[in-house]
Image: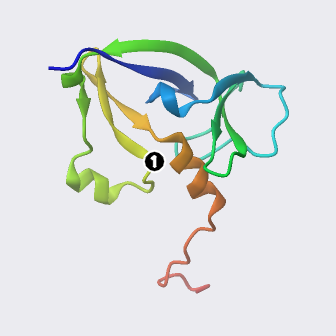
Amino acid sequence: MSGPEAVLLFQLGPRIFASRPAAVARIAGADEPFAEVLDGSCLGRAWSPARRLVVRGDDGVEAALAVDQVLGLREVEPGALRAIPPLAEGLLSTRAVAGLVLLDDAPTPIIDLLTLIRERRQPAPVDARSPDA
């Protein structure tokens, strides 16, 4: 049986999200310059961005997600970590939701930050049903 695992909690607008701490290269201030800052995504937009979660891609290039605040690390038991139910996984607009963590019995999405940034870099697919397609 494995022991507790840490998750990094952050606030983006009115919502709380989690991430694996190892996915974050560092936490930066809102005024630190980056070539790429994700200041809005399918997760929402920070109301008052005060921090940036910095991730480093396979190419070594850093990108940052603007967040309202970093709430810190929280240790959770392995039983609190859950996979996304298959039906829900098929309905999500992003593959960046890597799972759920139960925090005080509330399911909190675990976000794969690198996937979130990669998805933002790719152009949105054209919907064949759209009159503009």
Nearest the camera: 113 or 26? 26
Q: Who's the residue at 69% across and 45% down the image?
A: 60
Rendered position, 18 above or below 36? above
Q: Nearer the viewer, residue 1 or 94?
A: 1
Whole-percent x, y for residue 1 in the image: 14, 20
109 vs 55, nearest the viewer: 55
- Does residue 1 appear anywhere in the picture? yes
The three-letter amino acid code for the residue at tag 1 is Ala
Q: Position of residue 129 (x, y in %)?
A: 47, 83
| Scheme by which the image is coloured | rainbow
Q: Is residue 117 left or right of residue 112?
A: right
Would you identify the image quadrant in which residue 49 lies?
A: top right
> What x and y, as percent, mark residue 124?
58, 68
Q: Read off the residue under disc 1.
A: 96
Residue 35 found in image quarter: top right
Answer with the quarter of the image where residue 66 lies: top right
Residue at 83 percent across and 27 percent down: it is 32
Residue positioned 63% across, 37% down in the render: 55
- Is residue 128 found left or right of 123 in the rendered image? left
| SS of the residue under disc 1 | loop
